[in-house]
Amino acid sequence: MSCASANRLLRIFTAKPSINTETTTTTVLNPVAVTRVHTNKHDYETPQGLRNVVDMFKKSCKNKQFRLRSDIYKSTVLRLAKVKAFPMIEEILEAQKNYKQISSEGFVIRLISLYGKAGMFDHALTLFDEMPTFYCHRTVKSFSALLRAAVSAKRYDVVEELFRQFPSKYSIQLDVVSYNVGIYAFCEMGSTDLALGMLREMEELGMEPNLITFHTLLCVFYEKRGYEEGEKIWALMQTRDGVDPDVVSYKLRLKGMILGGQVMEAVELVDEMRLKGVQPDVHCFNVLIKGFCNDGKLEEAKHWYDELVKCVGTANRTTYGTLVPFLSEKGDFDMAFQICKVALATNGRLLIDVGVLKGVVERLFSQGMIGEAKTLVDLARKKKLEIDLPLNMW
């Protein structure tokens, strides 16, 4: 297959539609070279366009290198799911049975996962049942993939049934990954007691829960059952050998403390993290900044922003979205202006929401800080970002 032909086959499936423009640019990888191409955003918006997408995809699949591109499979299925073209998703995934890779468990797992992401769990289950007909051996890996497909499709109701019936029906020995998926599903359902029951069942079977197990439980217990209940899970995690809290663990505990009104305890926890050699990341600092903003404590919020910059280097969209409106509300327009300048000067993806930026510009203007307001507008325009303001503002 020539370089030009491969690009034509791949172009529809890799470029992401632009919200503001008619075309978008992306990088396409093929076996020969990397080329930049353009894709019309309307490919997925008309019946004929969708038909072309499916036909081109099926034709492209005849190329082995194309079939290795799991990212293209995923993006295409998600796009089709977005426009509810479910029969077309079935068409392109069923066509994969024509290739010898269908006897590979890894390849089938990918297809099961795609059906789950499309919300087509019944198709994922059928594919799992059909695996022996492809001379494809089912293991706990494909069973875990089926569980994840149920979760992706939000079919939490079938997870318990899968757990209770499938291992004996298919002689599959469950593992920690399977139980982690089950615990996550029950947490998503709000069935925290069932999630705890699965944790106990793991231990009775001699399985050691890992950080993923406890992160899932910490997240839901702090958020849904409150600070005290979350602390019980934290204490339980501390009793497990080989399960040492990492930065994600501490972030979840920090969030639990902030939600529970334990702001000063959260500050002490950051000190504890550092003593244990776990460096807080931008997400940890954002939790503290949000906590102090919610409490109306300006100086403390500014302090933790300074700590973030000193320790991490770069804030993110959440930081700016939390802190900038708070600074404006509290009348600290100088710092709001400086932070917005930093956000607009950052290379790459825009880190500040247009609405947040517009609010700062309007407040600067109302305070007579015309030069600062114009500076932000000019910087925004360099980012190809237009701030829609009343004509009389200038």
Image (spheres, rainbow, N blue to C red):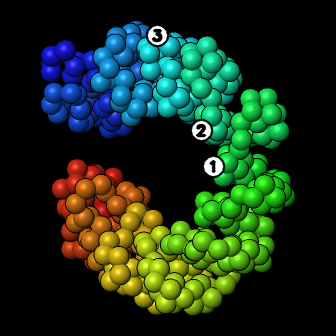
Residue drawn at x 22%, y 60% as measured from the top left: 347
Count neighbours of disc 1 (C-alpha within 10 A) and say few if under 14, some if 14 to 19, many if 20 or more: some
Question: For the residue labelled by badge 3, is the local secondary structure a helix, a strand or a loop?
Answer: helix
Regarding residue 20, the answer to whether it shows in the image is: yes
- Find the distance from the CA under tag 3 to the CA under tag 1: 30 Å
Where in the figure is residue 241, as x and y percent of width and height? 65, 74
Asked if residue 280 lies left or right of residue 267, the reply is left
| Mark 2 lies on residue | 141
Where in the figure is residue 356, as x and y percent of width and height? 41, 63
Where residue 98 is drawn, which disc sits there? 3
Where in the figure is residue 66, as x and y percent of width and height? 32, 23
Lower position in the chain sequence, tag 3 or tag 2: 3
Q: What residue type is disc 1 on?
A: Val
Quarter of the figure with residue 225: bottom right
Q: Do residues under tags 1 and 2 come within 8 Å of each other at their CB atoms?
A: yes
Q: In the picture shown, does residue 68 fall above or below 255?
A: above
Count neighbours of disc 2 (C-alpha within 10 A) and say few if under 14, some if 14 to 19, many if 20 or more: some
- Find the distance from the CA under tag 3 to the CA under tag 2: 23 Å
Regarding residue 297, the answer to whether it shows in the image is: no
Q: What residue type is disc 2 on?
A: Lys
Where residue 177 is drawn, which disc sits there? 1
Q: Nearer the viewer, residue 101 or 26?
A: 101
Lower position in the chain sequence, tag 1 or tag 2: 2
Count neighbours of disc 3 (C-alpha within 10 A) and say few if under 14, some if 14 to 19, many if 20 or more: few
Where residue 207 is drawn, which disc sits there? none
